[in-house]
Amino acid sequence: MRDVGILTESPVASDFSGTRLAACNLCEAICGLELTIERGTVTSIRGNEADPLSRGYICPKGVSMADVYTDPDRLRRPIRRVGDEWVEMGWDEAYDLVADRLAATITEHGRNAVGVYLGNPSAHSLGSATHGTAFVKSLRTRNRFSASSVDQIPHQLIGWQLYGHQLLLPVPDLDRTSFFLVFGANPMASNGSLMTAPDFPQRLRDLKARGGQVVVIDPRRTETAKVASAHHFVRPGTDAVVLLAMLHVLFEEGLTTPPSYVDNVARVEELVREFIPERAEPVSGVPADVIRQLTRDFAAADGAAAYGRIGVSTHGFGSICQWAIQCLNLLTGNFDREGGVLFPEPAVDIVGRRVIGPGHFDVWRSRVRDIPEFAGELPVSTLREEIETPGEGQIRAMVTMAGNPVLSTPDGRSLARAFEGLDFMVAVDIYLNETTRHADVILPPTSALERDQYDLVFHNLAVRNTSRYTPAVFAKDDDQRHDWQIFGALASRLQKRLDTFAPLRARVIARARMTASPAVVLTGLLATGRKVSMRRLRANPAGVDLGPLRPTMPERLQTKDKRIDLAPALVVGDFDRLRTSLASGSSAGADELLLIGRRHKQDCNSWMHNTPRLTRGKPRHHLLMHPDDLAARGLTDGARVTVTSRVGSVEVEATGVDDMMPGVVSLPHGYGHQVAGTRLAHAQGVPGVSINDLTDPERLDVSGNAALNGVPVTVSAAPVH
Ligand SMILES: Nc1nc2c(c(=O)[nH]1)N[C@H]1C(S)=C(S)[C@@H](COP(=O)(O)OP(=O)(O)OC[C@H]3O[C@@H](n4cnc5c(=O)[nH]c(N)nc54)[C@H](O)[C@@H]3O)O[C@H]1N2
Ligand SMILES: Nc1nc2c(c(=O)[nH]1)N[C@H]1C(S)=C(S)[C@@H](COP(=O)(O)OP(=O)(O)OC[C@H]3O[C@@H](n4cnc5c(=O)[nH]c(N)nc54)[C@H](O)[C@@H]3O)O[C@H]1N2
Ligand code: SF4
Ligand SMILES: [Mo]
């Protein structure tokens, strides 16, 4: 037997040879990894066969975990901008500088003058979950933003409205379902989202081998569509009418079997009455008979799960779509049943224990555009104007944490300009990039292999109940800091400068909370859950299996009356906007195309482009369009084209593929690297443009989530330079 480090949880010594277990933090699949280390250097990474959830799976990104650890471009010590130069500085000096500047901003202009943006890797770090959120709270600003509002806010809003908590989200029972209906997700490339399902490809093969069906609704014939039983094109932004027509058919044909704890079914029947499939067809491009048959097949299946992700979340009617998907599952008896959709029961019940609050909506609004908050956050689409518009409450200092909003949020180019106008900006990030280069100070935390990991968020969304704690593989250098240490240090320094009159007891408690390590906090959380102890997790670093998903309803509902109101006012109220949009017809003009995004297996949002392992091979940055759309514009395959939206314009190569629905074009997000000078040198050489120089911050769902998909654009030959 090889030494897999069981019970030896201290980081490896510099001359260590053997294997160690770790967890991949690059996507929601949270795969368990086995690292082979020779004399302190990682020589190979593979999937850990003994992991009860990921069962040995690994994707190309997981293999590059060690590249992040060794990357000479990765920041390890704080840097500060002096003129056009970046100079290293000591941690205490950096903390003091940041605390002084933030405290001065708050003293002079008030709490809301500090804006915060949390990026995606925040959700993948234990320290960020235990300490980052507390730091953000301690700022007591209303100007909180995150990548959630370019992602899954509609899910959270609907989870809160229907089930009483923003993170009480049912997950497809992928391993037992016999009908998997997918709207706007491409798990073959993304490895699943709000559905932690490592080794999605094998799980899908198993599903089909059981005789199950997979049906994909997507404007592109994606990698997932290609292995599905059926695929139907849908015009971007129009899924709501397809879903509502499906609900219409359920009622029309008497196929509804809602659970006893659901109210207002009749109200839903009334709401969807006008949405006949024949009306959905011309709007969406999905034939009426397909909608009818799909509904019948779904209702007849012995265990069916409807699921929708980025394609129908980052959508003008994301909340109606996510609500309708819940209704499909609820009304066909597929909610809270094996083979349908179920709620995971994680070892740390972040929902029931209120580790994260249930949610609220419209308790305050954005200052400039009057847009409601959700769960304490404002839509990131409003960030630029909150920085640039003078007046009481204007953002004058920014804190970004593990995010790159210049590439990942609508009209990122203008956001970059706004950052330049700030009085002060600090970024907690491991790289100098398109966003962090606008900061005055960058505080780089340790990277994933240097810290302890437990997935507080994703065990709550997984297709099987498991629990896993992996201690840091490598020790950090003395002059490195973990993210939780950075948040703790900043919070305490700010408190000293600002809360001098707070009661001593309150200050002591706050300080104790921020100085306990994430592992200590986790030990306490696990103890309250009583499912698995820290001791057991430490003895089983591959993870502990807690079994398949089980029915938990209605006990687990977080609503006051333990019932589900199927027709919440917020959703019903949004139907008027939908009707108006339908009455005004297609948003695209004669010459216009609709732009959507895409993800590739080897991409990781806007980062990881400085590892050659992931960037070699066929270029992935091209604009994909249907060959007929190319020909109609006199363009040929590979031509350089200008793509223009209301917001901006980019030049990029176009490729003709009949995988695209005619009238629809696609660009991946996270490209368009532009950091001049040192570091990120490799990413700088990665071609491509940022799709978010075209997406429009004015296009929002009722939840405040950005409608990144379905942006009207024109495409023409690029001028010869
Ligand atoms: N048009 C379009 N835009 C999109 C999307 C789309 O589909 N289409 N998708 C959206 C979605 S779903 C998301 S989640 C967002 C992502 O948006 P963001 O979260 O803003 O962007 P990321 O590219 O994930 O940026 C990650 C940042 O974290 C840093 N980082 C990596 N690891 C760590 C760490 O351990 N600690 C710290 N402190 N920093 C770290 C990286 O250097 C990088 O700067 O993009 C969104 N934007
Ligand atoms: N390899 C890789 N994996 C990732 C990431 C990554 O960057 N790279 N990012 C991670 C993150 S942060 C997230 S949130 C998840 C996202 O996970 P997914 O949602 O599975 O990822 P996408 O590939 O964005 O899938 C969105 C799909 O929606 C389609 N679409 C666009 N517009 C519409 C529409 O109007 N209607 C319909 N029905 N479909 C539409 C697109 O063609 C695309 O196939 O992936 C995660 N995993
Ligand atoms: S699927 Fe996701 S978690 Fe698994 S190895 Fe790939 S990037 Fe990492
Ligand atoms: Mo995301």
Image (cartoon, rainbow, N blue to C red):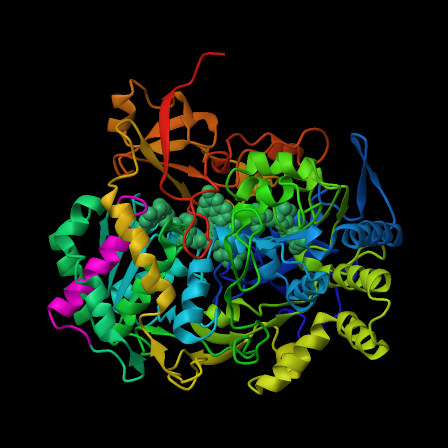
Question: Can the viewer see residue 228 in this picture?
Answer: no
Drawn side of residue 172 relative to residue 300, left or right: right
Drawn side of residue 236 relative to residue 612, left or right: left
Position of 431 relative to 712 (above/below):
below
Residue at 28% across / 73% down in the picture?
330
Position of 205 relative to 235 (above/below):
below
Looking at the image, which residue sits at the far top?
A: 720
The front one of 186 and 466 is: 186
Residue at 36% across / 82% down in the picture?
563
Position of 119 relative to 423 (above/below):
below
Q: Return the x and y of residue 700 as percentages of the image width and height.
A: 43, 48
Q: Is residue 244 magenta?
A: yes
Q: Quadrant of the N terminus?
A: bottom right
Residue at 56% across / 43% down in the picture?
606
Question: Can the viewer see residue 516 in this picture?
Answer: yes
Q: Return the x and y of residue 153 as percentages of the image width and height.
A: 47, 59
Q: Is residue 389 magenta?
A: no
Q: Return the x and y of residue 381 as percentages of the image width and height.
A: 52, 46
The front one of 524 and 247 is: 247
The front one of 422 and 27 is: 422
Q: Which residues are magenta?
A: 235-256
